[in-house]
Amino acid sequence: MPEAARATSSGPGRVLIAVYGVFALSATARAGVQIATRFAEAPVPYLLSAVAGVVYILATIGLAGHGPGARRLAWCAVVFELVGVLVVGTLTVFDTGDFPDDTVWSAYGRGYGFIPLVLPFIGLWWLRHTGRR
Amino acid sequence: MIGALVVVVQVALAALAVYGVVLTVLNRPPDVWTKRAVGLVVALLVLQAAIGAVQVFSGTALPETTTFLIYLVVSVCVLPIATQFATAEPTRWGGAVVAVGAIATAVAVWRLQGLWVPGA
């Protein structure tokens, strides 16, 4: 009988969840304020901020949860996050015109100490590491 | 917001972050002293938030009042939640979780100071 995968929410995983939780809070709160107060100025970046916030929330829930469902959710959210930060980062570096206002992923997360760029790599490594038997 | 209190709060948050990292390095779980240290820092944050809120609601005009008030709430709430999460599983990593909470709170306080432009 195959041994169950190790929990993602134990040991150093708790530090990762704490960082994801902080980003879930800050990205969501930022998007909330942007959409509530000045949505018409730049709808695309503000919606993107909201998407990023939701992705961080889902990653936090997935990593903190137990079982294969939570692990699958974490995988999807972290992969989406990696694609998001790379695509949005590249677009904002080469063409600033479409992004009049910063999002959490703009310029590979420069406004957030590049943590948004590093975080998905650590997340993927942690999911792989705990998934091994 | 009072400049001197902001400095005290930031020094306290930095010390708490270092303390959390030291716990992790020394392979010790958070203990009752960790909770006391967090309690002291949170008391300072509550004092700062109360002063800031009173100033805003008694007529100090800010360019972004809503954002300021959200950061004010965040600055108080993050550390208690992080500490609860850190002590729920008593391992060496609890200290690092407290450190993450302290650093995030320090960023929130730094943003608060940037948003504090009375009369603008």
Image (cartoon, coloured by chain):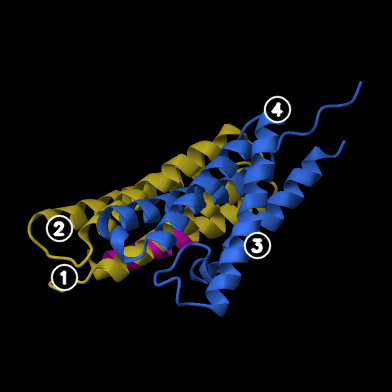
Viewer-proximal residue among B55 and B12: B55
Residue B73 position, x and y percent, is 31, 49
Q: Along the polypeptide, which appears first: circle 2 or circle 1?
A: 2
- What amino acid is found at the position of numbered circle 4 in the picture? Gly
Q: Could you say whether the residue bearing mark 3 is in a helix, strand or loop? A: helix
- What amino acid is found at the position of numbered circle 1 in the picture? Pro
The chain drawn blue is chain what? A
Answer few, some or many: residues within 10 Å of disc 2's Cα (few below 14, many 20 plus, some between 14 and 19): some
Pointer 4: what residue? A67
Q: Residue at x 49, y 41 (%)?
A: B83
Q: Which residues are magenta?
A: B5-14
| Distance between mark 1 and mark 3 Cα atoms | 37 Å
Residue A58 position, x and y percent, is 56, 41
Query: Is mark 3 in CB contact (under 8 Å) with mark 2?
Result: no
- What amino acid is found at the position of numbered circle 3 in the picture? Val
Examine the rendering and report whether any part of residue A94 can be seen: yes
- What amino acid is found at the position of numbered circle 2 in the picture? Val
| Distance between mark 4 and mark 2 Cα atoms | 47 Å
Pointer 3: what residue? A118
Query: Is mark 4 in CB contact (under 8 Å) with mark 1?
Result: no
Pointer 2: what residue? B56
| Distance between mark 3 and mark 2 Cα atoms | 37 Å
